[in-house]
Image (tube, grey):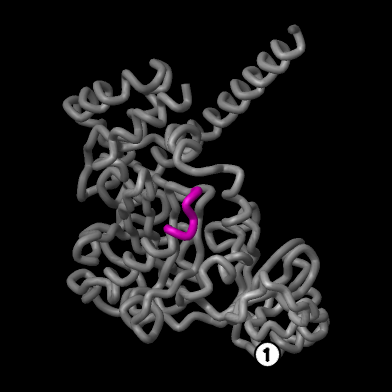
Amino acid sequence: MLKPLAKSLYKRAKSAYYTHQAMKYFEQKTQNYLAIHKHLSPLPESAKQEALEFWSPLLSKHRLEHTLSWHTIIYNSNRFCPTHKAYLDNAFYYLTLLPYLNTQGYAKALADKNYADMLFTSYNRPATIAKRVNGSYYVLDSTGDLACSSIDSPLESSLPRLRHKLITKQDFFALLRSSAPCVIKPTRASETGSGNNIRLLDSSLDNDELESLLSHYPSDFIVQDKIKQHPFLSALNPTSINTIRVVSLLYENHFSILACTLLVGEDGLTSNGGHFRIGIDRDSGLLRDFIIKGKGEPIDALPNAKDQSYKAAPIPSFQELLAMTKAMHSLLPHFGLIGWDFTIDSNGNPLFIEINPDVPGCEIMEQLNEPMFKNHQEIIALACNHRT
């Protein structure tokens, strides 16, 4: 009798401690966003009252100030839709909404970039040259020329399939040199994000230099072809692969695109290191008429853009990209909410880069667009009831 009670009390105490520590983190993060604005304008009283009326039945009283801080951040960043009651604060989004919509136990594994080849075999993506998983080196093999392929089994399909084929480390080094220029990046969700540790490799590297390079990757990684992006995107900043982040919702038999943004780099290979962000109109593919830098600093123009034509032209193949998102999301039904990163390749086709099922962020998306759940406010209430 006492043992189940003790377990229950321990579980509650552990959950309360975790929530307390998480709130400290999100409150500090919120202060960092507020500090970006040197002249912070207060949230209009009418917008404040509307937000309080919506959120007061859903959140505890001490949480409302945190929520209002996020409404203030968005009011100072978002020129498209500066006020709306359904804007989310970061703590509610990560601690309540995401666990309600996504099966958390699967998120870290499926966010691993080394599995994208197997999950999305038929979709346009950068070609994989080689990878390291759990200490072993592999290439992708679609011929079925593996030791197990000789087994005559009724469960074996005659259709070609992608498999991982083991290679030696020396073969891996030779393959890298013959395939250069190529890109290496870590794959585990805990080691990626914001363009972390992504490097361009060239054919001049000898074995000692490659050994030294691999010391920067203590666990898993993938090596892919260098992406050739569409001239529309290259003209915004030629040194980085400029990407389109899409957040999609699959909920109770209904699919929706919640928000889209364009991420443009400055220095380096990637665009997602916190450089320049522009909202995208979902219907037209046109960019919104304002830009933020990093976590919300407004700027007038992209510093490295070739010209200003991007302000009037839609992103190429944007509707095809959204259709591709819908088709790919159906392959991951355990996740109601996913963040997707795409670019447009040199042939004008959407090119899938990676998924973010564990932490598809909300902060930047809502600073550049309208509320992600503007048309799904019932889900906000359901997530609160599910938590309690």
Residue stretch rendered in magenta on the structure: 330-334
Give percent across and percent down for residue 350: 38, 74
232 and 292: which one is in front? 232
* Rendered view: 282 above or below 237: above
Give the quadrant of residue 300.
bottom left
Give percent across and percent down for residue 124: 45, 77
Report crowding for label 1: few under 14, some 14 to 19, many 20 or more residues within 10 A (C-alpha): some
172 and 155: which one is in front? 155
**Number of numbered discs visible in the structure rendering:** 1
Q: Residue at x 24, y 64 (%)?
A: 287
Give the quadrant of residue 90.
top left
Q: Residue at x 48, y 31 (%)?
A: 27
Q: Is residue 129 left or right of residue 120?
A: right
Query: Is-magenta flag for residue 333?
Result: yes
Give percent across and percent down for residue 355: 50, 60
Query: Is-magenta flag for residue 311?
Result: no
367 and 135: which one is in front? 135
Q: Which secondary structure dominates the residues rendered in magenta?
A: loop
Give percent across and percent down for residue 122: 48, 75
Q: Which residue is mark 1?
A: 203
Q: Which three-letter amino acid code belongs to the residue tagged 1?
A: Ser
* Rendered view: 213 above or below 34: below
User: Would residue 31 be visible to someone looking at this image?
Assistant: no
139 and 293: which one is in front? 139
* Image quarter hosting the N terminus: top right
